[in-house]
Amino acid sequence: MNIFKSLKKYVVFIFLAAISCEESLQEFDLISIVPCTDTNVIENPFIISDFECQNNVTIEDLSIVRNPTETGINTSLFVGEYTDGSSANDGLTINYGSSINLSENGVFRFKLRSQITGELQVKLQNDSSGEVALSSTVFGGDGWQQQEFEFNEFEGFSFNKIIIVFNAGVETNGEDIYYIDDLRFDPTIDPCEDIEVDLSVINDFECQQNYFLGDPNQGDTVVPIVDNPSISGINTSESVGQYTDNGTEPFDNLLIDFGEPIDLSANAQFSIKVFSSIQAPVIAKLEGGSADVERTATIQEANQWVELTFDFTEAQGAGNTRLILFFNAGNNNGTEDDIYYIDDLRFVPFVDVCAGVVTDLSIISDFECQQNYTLANANGIPVVDNPNPNDVNDSDLVGSYTDDGTEPFDFLLVDFGQPFDLSGRPELNIKVLSSSAVPLTAKLEGGTTPLEITANIDVVDEWKNYKFDFTSAIGSDNTRLVIFFNSGQTDGSIQDIYYIDDIRFTTVDCSEIVEDCTGVQPDLSIVNDFDCQQNYGAFGAGFIVQNPNISCENRSSNVGQYTDNGTDPFDALIISFGQAIDLSVNNQFKIKVLSSMAAPLLAKLEGGTTPVEIYQDIAVVGEWTEISYDFSVAQGNGNTTLVLFFNAAETNGTLQDIYYIDDLRFEAP
């Protein structure tokens, strides 16, 4: 009984050991393994070996072992294990024993697992007729990979030996291990079988190769089919075209002759995918009909697939028979062997991206769906691809304005044809991409009061939005907008290019402080704005303060703070000009006031032959308000001093009544 119990314990121990060590059975030489348990195996002569039930060709220098990773594409229990030699070109040789039939089964496949990354080479050999070799890349890792080599084009040869060279061309320590499985020849499958011809596709370098690329008279293929250099993004095709351009010739081209009029009735837009190492313009031109039509697009991103489209709706019915492509058009800064990979050349339906867009007349032009007014200059404003999209302007299309930089007041004109309404949107915005820092002036004219504002292009080679606040021109009924690039200067060239976009009138951002005085020229019609134009009145420390109420009525950073003795009826702020005030044109005095109480405000001109005084009221409390005085009657009086009486003739104030003032100026009526 004790012996039985001991034997039972021993047997159980062996059983558990077998379970826990199952994956290491091949290490025990005394255990005989029979991998195949299928009794109905039909021999497939095209299977070389699956290391289980189909071992039809003997492979030397190879061991059968348990699959180290029964996952992914290979869950077989048993596989082959090969230890690569140290030589750079040694390999695993499979003597097929007879001629390999490549006429029907021309694709050699097998599964591979290795920790080594390197080149894998498969050679077919015959002792008398030489060899052919194909290569692929092995990526080291824990998973199984499918390797595939198409030898169907060599079906007329008689090969009887297969050599697999691992890590080809690299000498090793002779200890690299490769696991292989399911070596076989499979039928060659035509991926284009049953694909119907689509003549809207010029060439996809796979199943739709409907038109010859290049001049047929040249004989050789101008665009050979190659492997896709970057299977990613918008192009996952395995095969693409490789076009070699002479980059030193500005108009070297790829010609596609259709031999008959191109039907654009349904598909009027030409599309092409391009992979290039450089950003470059591409011209597509239709010719051979009643009128040539040319369109330009730009390869915006290097080293990735991009799709370029060209709208040829204008060429419908023109009967053009040829399409010509110019890569890096107009430039000679390349080499004689610039390579462009191309794919999916086709005509597609034109899609109007602006369909359904409602016209917004506050937008002058965005060079896309809102082109609401004519932009006029001597050279016209062509619409081009955005040369440098960024966060400020990622539009696809922009305007290209060519300015005569030797002419100080060459301009871009927008004629509205009627008074332009600024009441809701008085701020002009324009995005500019310039290669130089220059003055930029915007002017409204054609109404009762023209207004000109100058800013400075201070960002080079990048987009920036520039703003011009025309609030003071509301109600002036101006009918024209004039924009001067490099205004007042003659230091440019006769063809200075400025890229422009999104020219529009918007609401004013009242939270934005206006305080940049860079490049501001003195305007003596302005008495004092306490920022950039402090032309008259010596106001010392404590008088100029920060604007306590920045608003749409007054966005200035700094204003004046005047403290009045409200118990003195004629306590005054005196501003001396030192000479006669010129009222011949600008005879309307204006002042912005922020007061905590309603009060009379007397403005008086004195110091000449006849003093003139005018009473107005501060009627708005707690907000900025503008008050005007008509001093046209004082023309010729020679007055030299402006005197302001706050709470004039009254004594109901305090000893320190504070009034904030700003933008004291004389304007034309």
Image: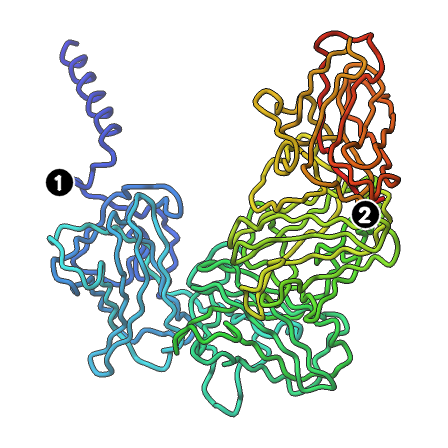
**Quadrant of image for the C terminus:** top right
- Verify CB contact (< 8 Å) between mark 2 and mark 1: no
Residue at 52 percent of width and 75 percent of height: 330
Residue at 34 percent of width and 58 percent of height: 110
Depth check: give the residue in front, 276 or 476. 476
Residue 526 image offset from top left, x and y in percent = 70, 39
Q: Which residue is mark 2?
A: 584
Which residue type carries mark 2?
A: Ser
Q: Is residue 197 above or below residue 517?
A: below
| Neighbourhood count class around disc 1 (C-alpha, 10 Å): few under 14, some 14–19, many 20 upward | few
Q: Secondary structure at mark 2?
A: loop
Depth check: give the residue in front, 206 or 463. 463
Residue at 81 percent of width and 29 percent of height: 604
Residue 582 visible from this viewpoint: yes
Depth check: give the residue in front, 4 or 92. 92
Report how many numbered discs are placed on residues in the image.
2
Question: Residue 363 vs residue 499: left or right?
Answer: right
Residue 499 visible from this viewpoint: no
